[in-house]
Amino acid sequence: MTTGYAIVLAVALGTTLAATPLVRHLVVRFGAVVQPSDDPRRVHTQPLATLGGAAMFIGFLAAMAV
């Protein structure tokens, strides 16, 4: 039973790690980033991607398919 959980975890981890660079490339290409501003609530100094959860969602879907 534990082996099954380990397989699902490995699939989720591997898929997420593989999808992250692809999602990052697409985010930068389509401009889905938040630019730094003078707003005191925004503390980042570099553009920040807004769709980082998409790679995790792809990993989740792959794990659920397994």
Image (tube, grey):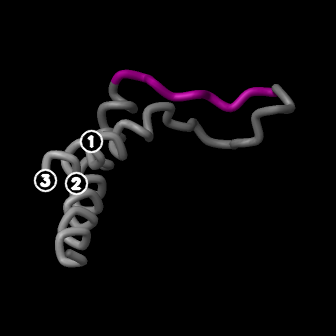
Q: Are marks 3 and 1 in contact (CB under 8 Å)?
A: no
Where does the magenta region start and end? 30-38
CB under 8 Å between discs 3 and 2: no
Q: Is residue 57 above or below residue 29?
A: below
Q: Percent x, y for residue 60?
A: 29, 47
Tell us which disc is closer to us: 3 or 1: 3
Q: Residues within 10 Å of mark 3 (few under 14, many from 20)?
A: few
Q: Residue at x 29, y 62 (%)?
A: 13
Kindly identify the amino acid type of the residue bearing the numbered disc 2.
Answer: Thr
Q: Indicate the amino acid at tag 1.
A: Ile
- CA gap, disc 1 to disc 2? 7 Å
Which numbered disc flags the more N-terminal residue, 3 or 2? Answer: 2
Mark 1 / mark 2, whichever is N-terminal: 2
Whether the residues at callouts 1 and 2 have beta carbons within 8 Å, the answer is yes
Relative placement, left or right, of 2 versus 36 is: left
Q: Is residue 3 above or below residue 59?
A: below
- Looking at the image, which residue sits at the far bottom? 2
Q: Amino acid at mark 3?
A: Val
Residue that badge 2 annotates: 15
Question: Split into 4 quadrants, where in the image is the N terminus?
Answer: bottom left
Give how far across and how far down residue 44 sits, in percent: 70, 42
In the picture as drawn, the residue positioned furthest to the left comes out as 66
What's the distance in space between the residues labelled 3 and 1, CA to CA?
Answer: 13 Å
Crowding near pointer 1: few (<14 within 10 Å), some, many (20+)?
some
Question: In front here: 60 or 47?
Answer: 60
Residue depicted at x 50% and y 31%:
50
Q: Which type of secondary structure does the marked residue at label 2 adopt?
A: helix
Q: The residue tagged with tag 1: helix, strand or loop? A: helix
Q: Residue at x 44, y 40 (%)?
A: 52
